[in-house]
Amino acid sequence: MPTPEWTPDALIRQFDHVRGYTEQLAEPLSPEDQTVQSMPDVSPTKWHRAHVTWFFETFVLAETEPGFAPYQDEYWYLFNSYYESVGPRYSRPDRGLISRPGAHEVGQYRSNVNDRLRDVVAGLDSGSLDKITPVIELGFHHEQQHQELLLMDIKHVLSVNPKQPTYAGRPSERGEPDALGWVDVEGGLVEIGHAGEGFRFDNEEPRHRVWLEPYRLADRLVTNGEWSEFMADDGYDRHEFWLSDGWAKVKSGQWRSPFYWNEIDGMWFEHTLHGTLPVNPALPVSHVSFYEAEAYASWAGKRLPSEAEWEHAVDSDSQPVAGNLADSQTFHPRVAGPKTGRLRQMYGDCWEWTSSAYHAYPGFRPPAGAIGEYNGKFMSNQMVLRGGCALTPNDHARSTYRNFFPHTARWALSGVRLADGGAPVTAV
């Protein structure tokens, strides 16, 4: 998308839009809901609300506000996520122990920073505005990342509640999945990575050339019904389909189904943000780890696409950024649309695991200062996912977006697209 003309009024409008959506997502939750941390990977809702506020206070107000002073000194410690350059931070696995400040006090913090940032932006001269606008825009997309994480995290929080309360959204249609189709993609010397106008994170650059052999992508995501066949064929009990570390995790974690599936009296149910329901075989399978995705592909006699193959296929097919993203308000994958002979479900529904390790592109250099800690230092022991999911804001998705999670992550809304043919990817 083109870069907006960031006048002060335009910045403030987008700021209010992004900040308002976070509060909209938190509105159905009680203060108690917002405090719970159900596992180390999950952060409490109120922590997300406070951390994204801390980001604007730390990286915008501290640089631009005359006579700046933090709203609360201790908030800089409590709500710093991983920025070593900013100072010490509270332990991530213990965020649920922060009973104070409460959700109401976090709301007051948000309001205070909102008012101060609007005042600062309205009063900046053109030179100062040009300097700070990229950081404010980064703050928009940072908050959108946390909006998605807020939903993933509260899904887990509510799943461990004995009553398994609902959050929002609506059940997806049942439908009947069609037979898996394939789309051929030309290989050759292609370019991937962000170029031109529009926002991008630093890890999406620089644009560079990659050699791809001709390959095929499945025209839709793998479904629950297809995953059930893998389970019925003892997929979780047959070591030959699994990477060594994955097999060890299957055994130690006693995995036997996707993360939110539970068998009750011989019937499988799935926990969603709109309730716990019988598994719908027509929907894309979700909440599976990279290890599970890789094992399924091996069982099916296929493989996972590389991130270069995924991006090149989307660009070659002129795929618009459209699909079952957060604006649909389903908050869950839905059935693939009718066959078109083209790729389906490339955006939305589930983040799609790729076979690509999360590493720097050739020529990547992190920005100077604390902002340089945003992506670069995580380029180890993670795998890349592409495409967005049903929790991703529509204006946050793009073909070059590189999400990343550890190989074992299952609480994220992740799914599987198969690939076939081709050969290992070589950057040049």
Image (tube, rainbow, N blue to C red):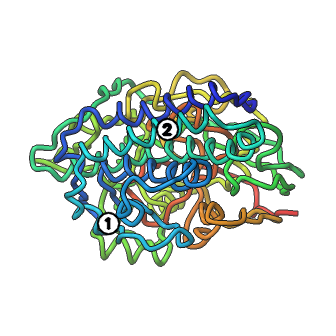
Crowdedness near tag 2: few (<14), some (14–19) or many (≥20) residues, C-alpha within 10 Å: many
Q: CA distance from mark 1 to mark 2?
A: 22 Å
Q: Is residue 215 above or below residue 178?
A: below
Residue 109 - label: none
Q: Is residue 30 above or below residue 384?
A: above
Instruction: Give how far across and how far down residue 140 sits, in percent.
Output: 56, 41
Residue 40 - label: 1
Q: Is residue 164 visible?
A: yes
In front of the other: 68 or 214: 68
Q: Is residue 415 above or below residue 255?
A: above
Query: Where, quadrant-wise, is the C terminus in this rendering?
Result: bottom right
Q: Is residue 302 visible?
A: no
Crowdedness near tag 1: few (<14), some (14–19) or many (≥20) residues, C-alpha within 10 Å: few
Q: Amino acid at mark 1?
A: Pro
Which comes before the other along the chain, label 1 or label 2?
Answer: 1
For the point 44% across and 63% down, which residue is it?
Answer: 80
Instruction: Give how far across and how far down residue 233 sits, in percent.
Output: 36, 57
Instruction: Give how far across and how far down residue 356 sits, in percent.
Output: 65, 62
Instruction: Give how far across and how far down residue 103 sits, in percent.
Output: 25, 46
**What is the secondary structure assignment of the residue under circle 2?**
loop
For the point 40% across and 41% down, which residue is it?
Answer: 112
Identify the residue position indicated by label 2 in the image: 392
